[in-house]
Amino acid sequence: MLVDQRVLVFLGPPGSGKGTQSAKLSQVLQIPAISTGEILRHECQSGSELGRTVHAVMTSGGLVSDDLMNQVVAPRLEQRDCEVGCILDGYPRTVSQARFLRDFLERLGMPQPTVLDFAVSAKEIVTRLSRRRQCVECGKIFSLGAGRDALRCALDGSALIPRADDHPRAIRARLNLYNRNARQLRGYYRRQDYHRIDAAQSPDRVLHDVLIALGGAGRYPVQKIAPALRATAAY
Ligand SMILES: [Zn+2]
C-alpha cells in the first residue's frame, strides 16, 4: 500500500472544478482530500487559540499568512489517514508555503508532491461562476445548467440567489489575486512532477486526464471509477 503513497497538490483558480475533482479522485484512489478552506473553517469553530487567530484574520478580510497556513495544515498531514497519501486542495498557495511543504514531507518521510494544475480560461470561469446560485437557508451552492434552471434548493426548497462575490467584476478581481501567486507557484513546481490539466472539459474528461497523468487510467478499473463519475458535479 505504502508503495503507492502519493501526495497530490491541486492548483487551479476558483471555478476550475478542482473541488469536484478532488472529491472524485479521493474516492477513486481511496486517499483523503484535504481542503484548506474546510480546515480553516473547522479550526475557527473549534475555538482553539489557533482558531481564534485564524478567525480574527478572516473576519478582518485579511489573507491568512504563510506561517499561519503552515501551522494549520501541518498537523493535518500528520494524521494517520494521510499514511496512504492525500490530496491537497488550496495549499500551498505561495512559494514560501511550497518550500515549507517540501521540508515537512521530507521530515515525515513522505514523497514529494505530484502537482496537477487545472487550467481554464478567465472567460470560462466568469461564465461558470456567474451561473452559481446559493441557497438563502442552508448555503449550499448550485450551478444553473441548461434545462436545470430550478430556482429552489434541492435540499430544503428555499430560494436560490447569486452570491455577492460571483459578479463578473468580483470574479475577475479574485482571479487576478489568484494568478499573481499561481504564476510563481507554477514556476516553482514546473521542474518537478507537474501536470497541466485542461479543466475546460467535462468533469468526466478531466478526471480521465488526471488518471492518465497519474500513470495510466488502466491502473484504475472502470468499475472503481464509475461511482465517482456518477457523483454529482457541483461547479
Ligand atoms: Zn438549502
Image: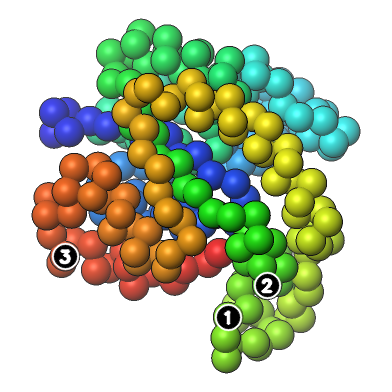
Location of residue 215 by image quarter:
top left
Under circle 2, the secondary element is loop
Q: Circle 3 is placed at which residue position?
A: 222
Under circle 3, the secondary element is helix
The image's colour scheme reads rainbow
Q: Residues within 10 Å of mark 1 (few under 14, many from 20)?
A: few
Callout 2–callout 3 Cβ contact below 8 Å: no
**Label whose residue precedes the other's in the sequence (3 or 1):** 1
Callout 3–callout 1 Cβ contact below 8 Å: no
Residue at 72% across, 27% down: 64
Q: Is residue 86 left or right of residue 141?
A: left
Amino acid type assigned to the residue bearing label 3 in the image: Val
Amino acid type assigned to the residue bearing label 2 in the image: Arg
Residue at 22% across, 30% down: 5
Under circle 1, the secondary element is loop
Callout 1–callout 2 Cβ contact below 8 Å: yes
| Whole-number angstrom distance, CA of label 3 to CA of label 1 | 26 Å
Whether residue 205 appears in this view of the structure is yes
Give the numbered dot on residue 131. 2
Q: Circle 1 is placed at which residue position?
A: 145
